[in-house]
Amino acid sequence: MSSAVIRHDWSLQEIKDLFALPFNDLLFKAQTVHREYFDPNSVQISTLLSIKTGACPEDCSYCPQSARYETELEREKLMALNEVVENARIAKQNGSSRFCMGAAWRNPTDKNLDSVIEMIKAVKAEGMESCVTLGMLTPEQARKLKDAGLDYYNHNLDTSPEFYGEVITTRTYQDRLDTLANVRDAGLNVCCGGIVGMGEKPADRAGLIMQLANLPKHPESVPINMLVQVEGTPLHGEAELDPLEFIRTLAVARIVMPESFVRLSAGRTDMSDEMQAMCFFAGANSIFYGEKLLTTDNPEANRDRELFDRLGISPLQITVDAAPDERETSRELAMGKVSPIQANQVA
Ligand code: SAM
Ligand code: DTB
Ligand code: SF4
């Protein structure tokens, strides 16, 4: 039995106290919790595809896809179904278990939603888990996605409620919480995290983690993105965050959301192998795999394969055609594999 209790009543001070621990104490605690809930050598891998790129009406200061900023990004219309399927097949061949499709929308129109539903069905037919991120959703839209067989919906809180207004003005924090509630109520798995390195204060990183940990149910996936600074966006030129502070953020997320997959998300191209190894030690157990995120670069697949080999990490295998109840147990699946510890105990 696992001993760390799942809580939803974290105070800001408790989270700040975790951040303030000596680095080794924090990492030891995170790794201890991690081992209670997961096989420490198994990492879930997802592949991203931008199905609708650029010309977004929102003003998220970090985002190259906002129509308000002059970036080098070429806007594109909604991708054709066959192109999506081709990309999903390649992702599966490369060992990815989840295919995530992102659209640069404030929210999907009902017509757009119907097109995305066709894509979700096609991805599922390829035997992969599906995830989409389409902006705000109404309760009806969330239900339609669930009925179509969608597994995960990604919608990030991005930062603390206090810092939020300095990053985005075109939708509120409450709008995001409402979409998350609609997604949860529809019975979808939630993927929700944020971005660090945007010039926020340490209290804002703690505030983001507190918001995530105090949601009525913890998100099944928690992506922690390091800001990718894109020329032309307001956050380009922001002071770089201390890499150790990024690792601390992952570690605290792991401790307060022990059952969630914590994803080491955007920003890996600029991280050394050693830094990524430390992120996995801090309890990150999911990555985006493949040479592109949505519009910016991700490490080459070869580099990731080599890194996994050097670290003795294997990609988590998920059986998508299992019954829904069994599918929900991907965490148990991660635990169920014979880990080196269990092998030693048998020997
Ligand atoms: N338009 C939809 C929305 O905002 O909900 C979906 C796509 S949006 C690109 C998904 C998430 O990507 C954002 O919430 C943000 O956390 C992350 N993101 C976007 N640009 C980023 C950047 N430059 N660096 C790191 N993360 C970024
Ligand atoms: C998330 O938290 N990170 C991903 C995914 N969810 C959709 C997106 C990262 C985007 C980085 C910038 C880009 O490539 O456009
Ligand atoms: Fe649009 Fe999403 Fe980018 Fe914000 S993060 S500008 S909503 S694509």
Image (cartoon, grey):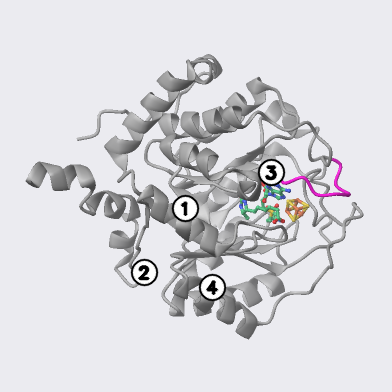
User: In the picture provided, is 41 more to the left or to the right than 26?
Assistant: left
Q: Nearer the viewer, mark 2 or mark 1?
A: 1
User: In the picture provided, is 95 more to the left or to the right than 225?
Assistant: left
Q: Are marks 2 and 1 in contact (CB under 8 Å)?
A: no
Q: Nearer the viewer, mark 3 or mark 1?
A: 1
Q: Amino acid at mark 2?
A: Val
Task: Tell me the residue that label 1 is attached to.
Answer: 307
Type of secondary structure dominating the magenta stretch? loop
Q: CA distance from mark 3 to mark 2?
A: 31 Å
Q: CA distance from mark 2 to mark 4?
A: 13 Å
* Residue 293, quarter of the rendered image: bottom right
Task: Tell me the residue that label 2 is attached to.
Answer: 320
The residue under the point 33% across, 73% down is 321
Task: Tell me the residue that label 3 is attached to.
Answer: 175
Secondary element at tag 4: helix
Characterize the local packing of mark 2: few (<14), some (14-19) or many (20 or more) Cα atoms within 10 angstroms.
many
Secondary element at tag 2: loop
Secondary element at tag 3: helix
Where does the image place residue 49, in percent across and percent down from the top left? 63, 67
Task: Tell me the residue that label 4 is attached to.
Answer: 120
Q: Nearer the viewer, mark 2 or mark 4?
A: 2
Q: Nearer the viewer, mark 3 or mark 2?
A: 2
User: In the picture provided, is 40 more to the left or to the right than 269?
Assistant: left
